Image (cartoon, grey):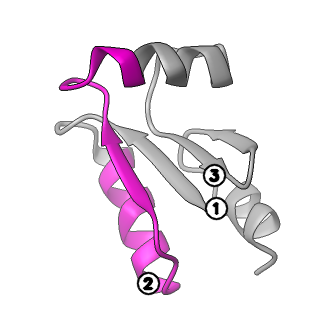
């Protein structure tokens, strides 16, 4: 299960989503601008306030880190 926490204006969020789509990875997008509870959840998981934050099978990746994403997905 992949969840990506985003905002609508974050360029790295768009890049991360495109990267997941390019690799045919299904994901759930959660916009933390629109969902205050999700923002708190993201901060609790990552201890960060910046986006994107990816939760890949309970592995937390902060930012658009291709190598971290690949490792967490086993690519």
Label 2, label 1: how far apart the Cα atoms are: 12 Å
Where is residue 32? Give x, y as percent.
Answer: 31, 27
Where is residue 49? Give x, y as percent.
Answer: 48, 14
**Stretch in magenta:** 13-38
Task: Name the residue at 30% across, 14% down.
Answer: 36
Where is residue 16? Give x, y as percent.
Answer: 44, 58
State the residue position of label 1: 66
Q: Residues within 10 Å of mark 2 (few under 14, many from 20)?
A: few
Q: Which mark is residue 65?
A: 3
Label 1, label 3: how far apart the Cα atoms are: 4 Å
In the image, 16: left or right of 8?
A: right
State the residue position of label 2: 22
In the image, 26: left or right of 44?
A: left
Task: Name the residue at 18% across, 36% down.
Answer: 9
- Mark earlier in primary sequence (2, 1): 2
Residue 25 within the magenta-colored segment of the rendering: yes
Do tag 2 and tag 1 residues touch (Cβ < 8 Å)?
no
- Above or below for 57 versus 6: below
- Above or below for 27 versus 49: below
Task: Name the residue at 62% across, 46% down.
Answer: 55
Q: How many marks?
A: 3
Where is residue 74? Give x, y as percent.
Answer: 81, 76
Tell me the SS state at disc 2. Answer: helix
């Amino acid at each position: 299960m992949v969840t990506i926490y985003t905002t609508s204006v974050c360029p790295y969020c768009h890049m991360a989503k495109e990267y997941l789509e390019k690799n045919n990875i299904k994901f759930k997008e959660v916009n933390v601008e629109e969902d205050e509870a999700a923002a708190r959840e993201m901060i609790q998981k990552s201890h960060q306030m910046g986006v994107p934050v990816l939760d890949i099978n309970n592995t937390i990746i902060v930012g658009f880190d291709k190598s971290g994403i690949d490792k967490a997905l086993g690519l």
